[in-house]
Amino acid sequence: MRPPAPPALPALGLALPLLLLLLLPPAPRAAYRAPRFDPTWKSLDARPLPAWFDQAKFGIFVHWGVFSVPSFGSEWFWWYWQEKKIPMYVKFMEDNYRPDFKYEDFGPLFTARFFNASYWADVFQASGAKYTVLTSKHHEGFTLWGSKHSWNWNAVDVGPKRDLVKELEAAIRNRTDLRFGLYYSLFEWFHPLFLEDKSRSFHQQQFPVSKTLPELYELVNKYQPEVLWSDGDGDAPDDYWNSTVFLAWLYNQSPVRDTVVTNDRWGFGTICKHGGYYTCSDRYHPGHLLPHKWENCMTIDKFSWGYRRDARLSDYLTIEELVKELVETVSCGGNLLMNIGPTYDGTIPVIFEERLRQMGTWLKVNGEAIYETYPWRSQSDVTPDVWYTSKPKQKLVYAIYLKWPTSGHLFLGQPIATLGATEIKLLGHGQPLNWTSLKPNGILVELPRLTFDQMPCKWGWALALTNVI
């Protein structure tokens, strides 16, 4: 059922320093350090991004919640059905559920009966990903942990009767080398306190003070996520959410203060402007180098983040398309956060598992050209579907090509090679390749003559070029 409104609070203005200080969890005395970051964007934006994030390059997003029960159309099912009354959603409900069925009635049907956190962790490890981000709460407000601030609308009280966040966190940390992260929606579509605040143009803060902020502190202290992926500002500004106060605590005093990374969705107008790394938009893919660290969050299902039963095979990206997405993203300085949508009973659909394992197979051969790399002076080549990464300390440049030339020769227009110093190898093959230097720059690489079965991988290949400029 829908959570009742918390006890009524007096109308609150935006200046709440005393109340916010009371909300802040006290730091243990032994762990206390003088604040390094002030609750201003100027100070917070100056925080160096923990190095592990840029080195990781590839993560897995998991959209899972009550929306996984109807599993129709989109994870925005509730909004499209009840608020927008889009005909296809209305008809779906009329055809499949009793007339008085409410969205809250989906809660007990979200069983997670077959959820096996250890199996999920093993699949994620096999994918080659270095971090994962689970939706702890989406815009529907249902929390995947037993939130004290979401009475009877959480996974411990309703449906699974389990702390799903804890189970996955423990499995990830015990069985893999992935970093554990959490997505959290700041707002909720139909929460009465949010709607009341909105009706007053966000000049009062009943919802963030009684719901959002307490849950954020609870999540960080209880599960210590190293990625905190904020979303859903509800068109409210960051000072309504008190984002800078929370982030100053996160960076200065929280148990993950030294390793946590955050994104840029902390209030209306902050996206692609403030925060740890930029997401800019869903499925953001600029195709060129950006001056600030960024992430391409995208979905294997082209049209939905959550699982949907009405998806067709053509709606899913192929492994060739996913490898291309990863290569182009990393070449331009970004990370790829690739999303899957499990079913209501906790299983990972086979097509998602296949894509994850295929990516892992590719990375076992070509991970050297992806992990811990840096953008090169050129991101792509005049030859189509060739992208570059580099490791300057090792004097290595990687040319990743997505199509094997039928001629057996690959022209690279960007590198300048030196006879007697430059060496070129195909990752997964190992033997030095013959090449010819061209004027004024560029090289022609003679690729090994391999049958399809002899190729080190099937969906893209990487050349390691030593001592080129």
Image (cartoon, grey):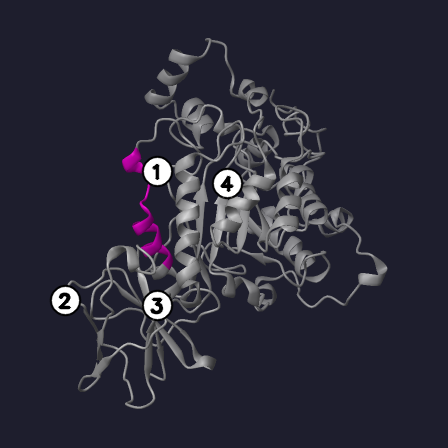
Q: Quadrant of the N terminus?
A: top right
Q: Mark 4 or mark 1, which has the lower sequence index?
A: 4
Question: Which amino acid, mark 2?
Answer: Ser
* For discs 3 and 1, the disc positioned in front in the rendered view: 3
The range drawn in magenta is 313-326
* For discs 4 and 3, the disc positioned in front in the rendered view: 3
Return the residue at label 3: 429
Question: Which amino acid, mark 1?
Answer: Phe
Q: Is residue 20 left or right of residue 64?
A: right
Residue 336 covered by magenta stretch:
no
Q: Mark 1 or mark 2, which has the lower sequence index?
A: 1
Q: Is residue 55 above or below residue 58?
A: below
Q: Magenta: predominant secondary structure element?
A: helix
Return the residue at label 4: 234
Q: Quadrant of the C terminus?
A: bottom left
In the image shown, does 237 or 314 lie closer to the viewer?
A: 314
- Say what secondary structure mark 3 lies in: loop
Question: Which amino acid, mark 4?
Answer: Gly
Return the residue at label 1: 303
